[in-house]
Amino acid sequence: MGQVEKNPALLTPEEYLALEARATRKHEYVGGVVYAMAGGRNRHHLIASNIGGMLYVRLRGKRCQYFNSDTKVRCRLPTHTRFYYPDAQVVCRPGPLDATFQDEPAIVVEVLSARTRRTDEFEKKDGYLSIGALNAYLLVEQDRALVTVWRRHSSGFTREIWEGLDAAIPLPEIETTLPLTEIYEGVTFGEEESEDDDFFA
């Protein structure tokens, strides 16, 4: 069998990181292919900001740290590498301060949208759940008070549903709890989400 030649159109992880350091907008990376990201609706940013604020306050002075959507997560799968920008992450074993990504998030959060739901629920889930340090992956709905949690147990990951403003998500892995009433503070429901309204990955 002949030698397989490298596709020149595919970027190496090092090439991607070098380009991303000079880019004026965010891009995610999957196995050599780069995908541009765009902005999201105010609802998306409000929910992500609520979660970020909660995590920052709850973790201040503790060993685990909150990082916002400017910090990438590197997923090193057996066949390729991926870089994603989650809406929030908590890291208990952080990488170097001058790095632009984390390798070992304990918690990863993505706020779902109509356009990105399939990617978040399948492709990104597979990438995040491949990280040995990950304890929980949270998928947060925008149009109703509902969060899906993929939580690690000794036998693998199991799926939990936390629904309603009276619910609270226990995260003993980082010694805190996230009440849905705080996640959705300031959010009004009843507005149907349009696929054209939110492009945020």
Image (spheres, helix red, strand yellow):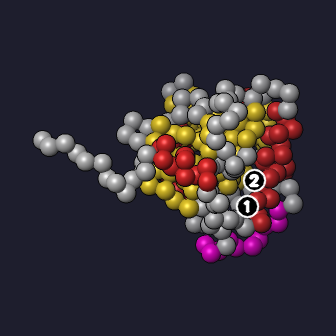
Quadrant of the frame with the C terminus:
bottom right
* Residue farthest left in this picture: 1
Q: Is mark 1 on a helix, strand or loop?
A: helix
Q: Residue 73 carries which label?
A: none
Q: How crowded is mark 1: few (under 14 residues within 10 Å), some or many (20 or more)?
A: many
Q: Nearer the viewer, residue 191 or 95?
A: 95
Question: Are the two marked residues, 1 and 2, in contact with CB atoms closer than 8 angstroms?
Answer: yes
Drawn side of residue 140 relative to residue 8, left or right: right
Above or below residue 64? Residue 86 is below
Give me the residue at 49% from left, 56% from top: 34
Q: Which mark is residue 44?
A: 1
Percent coordinates x, y for residue 95 in the rendering:
65, 30
Quadrant of the frame with the N terminus:
top left
Cα distance between the residues tagged 1 and 2: 6 Å
Drawn side of residue 46 relative to residue 4, left or right: right
Q: Which of 24 and 120 is in front in this view?
A: 24
Give me the residue at 79% from left, 36% from top: 177
Q: Can residue 200 be seen in this view?
A: no
Report the amino acid beneath label 1.
Answer: His
Q: Mark 2 points at which residue?
A: 48
Q: What element carries label 2?
A: helix
Above or below residue 39? Residue 119 is above
Which stretch is magenta?
A: 187-196
Report the amino acid beneath label 2.
Answer: Ala
Give me the residue at 78% from left, 48% from top: 51
Q: How crowded is mark 2: few (under 14 residues within 10 Å), some or many (20 or more)?
A: many
Q: Magenta stretch: residue 190 in it? A: yes
Give me the residue at 63% from left, 65% from top: 38
Percent coordinates x, y for residue 174 in the rendering:
74, 29
Percent coordinates x, y for residue 32 in the rendering:
42, 50
Percent coordinates x, y for residue 103 in the rendering:
58, 34
